[in-house]
Image (spheres, rainbow, N blue to C red):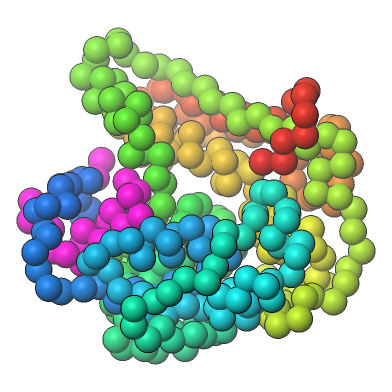
Amino acid sequence: MIKKIISPTRRQFLARTGAGAAGLVLGLNGLEAGSYSRIKGSNEKIRVGFIGVGNRGTQMLHTFMSMPDCEIAALCDVYEPYITRIYEKVDPRYISTRPGQIPKMGETFPGKVERYTDYRKLLENKSIDAVVIATPDHWHALQTIHSVQAGKDVYVEKPVSKTIEEGRAMINAATASKQIVTVGLNRRAAPTFLKLSADIPSGRIGKVTFASACHVSNMYPAGIGKLRPEDPPRDFDWDAWLGPRAYRPYQYNIAPYMFRWWEDYANQISNNGIHYLDLIRWMLGETAPVWISAGGGRYAVDDDRTIPDTMQATFEFASGSIVSINIVETSSGSFIPY
């Protein structure tokens, strides 16, 4: 369980609860979602840099801009219109497609905001205290590790990593650096789940030995489509987007959003399933599972994806509790692509 720090510093509070998320702290003592009024009054502001300001990054940016204790110091993205914030220059497909639609831009910043296309340059900026990482999943581990090594506190979007090995490397780096790293698992802050997180450990609803969750959508029959490779949009650095992954030609049904259906970059268990698994594990007071079994396949959707359209993963914990997470993207009804 997350331990409580009685007197959080302003930096710890923002790193832990920025954007209203009750997240998971890696490798260090965290703090419970505390009262904002406990720290309000100090003149200190946290200078925050954003790595990735597309769909989710823009949502996070707008939230952090509303926080009086936060100053936006820098923006970084591999797609130039995202950092210039000129909505009209964004590829129309990125604006009209749902999910992954880019929120309106054109923000007004009270101070100077540096712009970068290489996150390593942003990390060299010693005036930046913390970073928000909202890049594709396959970048989370490396950017988090580099950020704490550069002395920055980190808020990184879920999933924390693509593999167990990456996650362990992130914990080791965070612990060695003494920086605060928190993961954006924001559903913990929902009133219903907060109540359950108290009711279940107290035994109010009895001993819970089995939990199941199902994320249902309908991508039948064509899903993310079948597309040929093409040149990336103007001002889109495809090589930088790929980063630690092997080179392959650009396809619109990979980037900027649909990478979530390609195994090299993400998958739906880590995209949607992680919300349910995190909540259940948290409410049951479990840590890591001791046994995992998973199965699934591409049974109905005919597209370019490299992950299943139907999948079930079963997790057994040391206490004996069993958790089943199900992803079904072939439900009946209207097309629901998320």
Front residue of 55 and 183: 55
Q: How many marks?
A: 0
Q: Which span of residues is magenta-colored?
A: 1-22
Tell me: 82 left or right of 174. right
Instruction: Give the residue at x 74% y 46%.
Output: 307
- Image coordinates of residue 100 in percent, x first then y, are 65, 54
Q: Does the magenta stretch include residue 330?
A: no
Tell me: 152 left or right of 218. left
Quadrant for residue 146, please give it: bottom left
- Image coordinates of residue 27 in percent, x first then y, are 30, 57
- Image coordinates of residue 180 in percent, x first then y, are 27, 64
Front residue of 65 and 252: 65
Q: In which quarter of the image is the C terminus?
A: top right
Instruction: Give the residue at x 48% y 39%.
Output: 275
Relative to 122, does residue 166 appear above or below in the rendering? Answer: above
Q: Does the magenta stretch include residue 16?
A: yes
Front residue of 106 and 135: 106
Tell me: 326 left or right of 115. right
Q: Can residue 277 be seen in this view?
A: yes
Relative to 247, does residue 209 appear above or below in the rendering? Answer: above
Front residue of 217 and 261: 217
Q: Quadrant of the N terminus?
A: top left
Instruction: Give the residue at x 32% y 30%.
Output: 191
